[in-house]
Amino acid sequence: MGRGRLLAAAIAVAVGVLTYVLVARGPPPADELIRRKAIAMAEAAERKDMGFIMKQVSERFRTADGTGREEVRGVLAAQLLRGDWVRVMTANVDVTVTSPTTADFRGTYLFGRSRAKTLKDLAKESTVSAYEITATVELESDGEWRFVTASWQQADPTSLL
């Protein structure tokens, strides 16, 4: 076998392996995409990146009591932008895909806030709260999964430790 044929065979094998890896992996399943989105929203909250968070909320968003997207933006802004240090974590995130375009989401978000300026003041100057979020997520016409409904209730943060 000549050098040219050997090189061509090596390239063909490399292309075949690369194609297999890229095609076989494909995009992550919908439940994983939504789970990643929920975690990324918590990270964005820590960065106080309201733009990223609101891109994940549908223009059609409504809560059971009729609260819309803009009201949610206001509540989030009041909580995240008031200057205290904020730490946001997720726990018990569960996504169930119910159809090719809808999914149910449930997860707990924990918020830590502190005005402490020194390490010794951290314990007495900190508060932690948790909220259990239940939501419907839909695949919108632009190909993005977005939250279209949500409800929440306060949870005991110590139950998650």
Image (cartoon, rainbow, N blue to C red):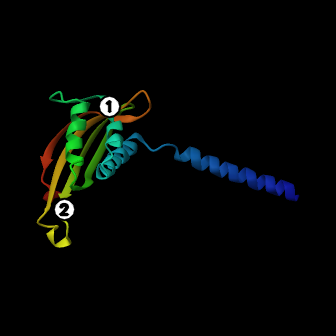
Report the amino acid beneath label 1. Answer: Ser
Give the residue displayed 84% in from the left and 54% down from the top.
5
10 Å neighbourhood of mark 2: few (<14), some, or many (≥20)?
few
Give the residue displayed 26% in from the left and 54% down from the top.
89
From this view, report whether residue 75 is shown above or below residue 80.
above
Q: CA distance from mark 1 to mark 2?
A: 32 Å
Q: Quadrant of residue 75 in the image?
A: top left
Quadrant (top left, top right, bottom left, bottom right) of the C terminus: bottom left
Q: Depth check: 99 or 150 in front?
A: 150
Q: Please tell me which of labels 1 and 2 falls first in the chain.
A: 1
Q: Position of residue 63 (x, y in %)?
A: 20, 31
Q: Is residue 143 left or right of residue 92?
A: right
Q: Depth check: 55 or 134 in front?
A: 55
Q: Position of residue 16 (x, y in %)?
A: 67, 49
Q: Is residue 14 left or right of residue 143?
A: right
Q: Depth check: 66 or 100 in front?
A: 66
Q: Position of residue 80 (x, y in %)?
A: 24, 48
Give the residue displayed 39% in from the left and 45% down from the top.
32
Give the residue displayed 17% in from the left and 64% down from the top.
116
Residue furthest bottom in the image: 120
**Circle 1 or circle 2, nearest the eye:** 1
Q: Secondary structure at mark 1?
A: strand
Quadrant (top left, top right, bottom left, bottom right) of the N terminus: bottom right
Q: Is residue 77 left or right of residue 23?
A: left
Q: Depth check: 116 or 130 in front?
A: 116
User: Label 1, on which residue?
Assistant: 58
Picture disc at residue 79:
none
Report the amino acid beneath label 2. Answer: Leu
From this view, report whether residue 64 is shown above or below residue 42.
above
Q: Quadrant of residue 120 in the image?
A: bottom left
User: Label 2, on which residue?
Assistant: 161
Q: Secondary structure at mark 2?
A: loop
